[in-house]
């Protein structure tokens, strides 16, 4: 009797194991349900303060750590290492444009005080342009309505107004360009034109001309993360369009808000020091 009972139990266990093994792959293939906050109109709710957490502002491409270009004080001001956010790793420069990029890199940080308009525009407190405004080491805030989206950046209070589904032509060239938005499913797509040639993509001298055209894509991947993608086209500088991608993180600090970063006050001596009475 005992032998028969043990045999029956073993058979049952064997059947159970087989059933579980058969059921497991089906369970693993079920799609992950991600809860994305939505507005009353059913669109993803992008309202809030966001920030990139990477070193793309130093250099969009792969870069290692390096000492500070202005301070000889150990790690203070050192350049942080980072991986490329460029699809494929490298920016596809035209040969003559690559030479200009290398010259920009040499002049990015001036060796002596004074006005240096050939230096990194961020150093001079010029508006950062698109897409650089997104991955500066500063947060930015999105305000969303059914017909318009506004983005306010902590850096020098740069801001954008993005009308939805009513595209208009850029009336003039500017540092931040001219934005038109639309929804593609859950992705906010922003088409940006009308740039001048006065901004860089990073501190490493990567640059563009006044023919720059940027298409941004903001895609929610959770309640606290956006996938940010920007396709960059400029036939004067690059051999083909290229793309960057990175996550953006919703700031959930208890007292988070945009703070004042009035950089014009920080560059007064740099720009006007030579005119100061001694």
Image (cartoon, rainbow, N blue to C red):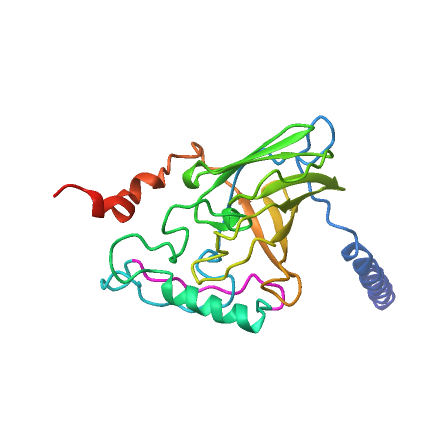
Q: Quadrant of the C terminus?
A: top left
Magenta segment: 77-88
Closer to the camera in the image, 151 or 172: 172
* Residue 241 drawn above or below residue 219: below
Q: Residue 108, located in which quarter of the rendered image?
A: bottom left
Residue 221 in picture, x, y percent from top left = 65, 47
In this view, the residue farthest toward the left is 278
Residue 80 sits inside the magenta stretch:
yes
The image shows a total of numbered marks equal to 0
Closer to the camera in the image, 19 or 125: 125
- Predominant secondary structure, magenta span: loop
Closer to the camera in the image, 160 or 79: 160
* Residue 137 drawn above or below residue 255: below
* Residue 181 drawn above or below residue 99: above
Question: Residue at position x 48%, y 71% from top?
Answer: 99
Question: Residue at position x 45%, y 69% from top?
Answer: 102
């Amino acid at each position: 009797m005992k032998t028969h009972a043990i045999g029956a139990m073993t058979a049952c266990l064997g059947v159970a194991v087989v059933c579980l093994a058969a059921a497991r792959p089906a369970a693993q293939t079920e799609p992950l349900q991600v809860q994305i906050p939505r507005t009353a109109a059913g669109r993803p709710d992008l309202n809030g303060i966001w920030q990139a957490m990477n070193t793309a502002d130093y250099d969009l491409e792969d870069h290692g750590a390096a000492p500070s270009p202005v301070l000889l004080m150990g790690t203070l001001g050192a350049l942080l290492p980072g991986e490329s956010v460029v699809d494929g790793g490298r920016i596809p420069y035209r040969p003559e444009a690559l030479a200009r990029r290398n010259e920009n890199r040499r002049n990015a940080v001036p060796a002596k005080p004074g006005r240096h308009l050939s230096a990194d525009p961020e150093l001079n407190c010029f508006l950062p342009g698109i897409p650089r405004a997104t991955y500066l080491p500063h947060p930015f805030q999105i305000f969303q309505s059914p017909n318009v989206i506004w983005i306010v950046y902590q850096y020098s209070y740069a801001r954008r107004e993005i009308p939805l589904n009513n595209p208009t032509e850029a009336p003039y060239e500017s540092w931040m360009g001219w934005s038109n938005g639309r929804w593609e499913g859950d992705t906010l797509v922003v088409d940006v034109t009308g740039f001048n040639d006065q901004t860089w993509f990073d501190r490493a001298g990567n640059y563009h001309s006044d023919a720059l055209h940027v298409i941004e894509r903001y895609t929610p991947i959770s309640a606290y993360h956006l996938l940010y993608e920007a396709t960059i086209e400029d036939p004067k500088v690059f051999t083909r369009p290229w793309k960057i991608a990175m996550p953006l993180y919703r700031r959930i600090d208890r007292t988070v808000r945009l703070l004042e970063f009035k950089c014009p006050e920080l560059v007064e001596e740099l720009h006007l020091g030579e005119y100061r009475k001694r």
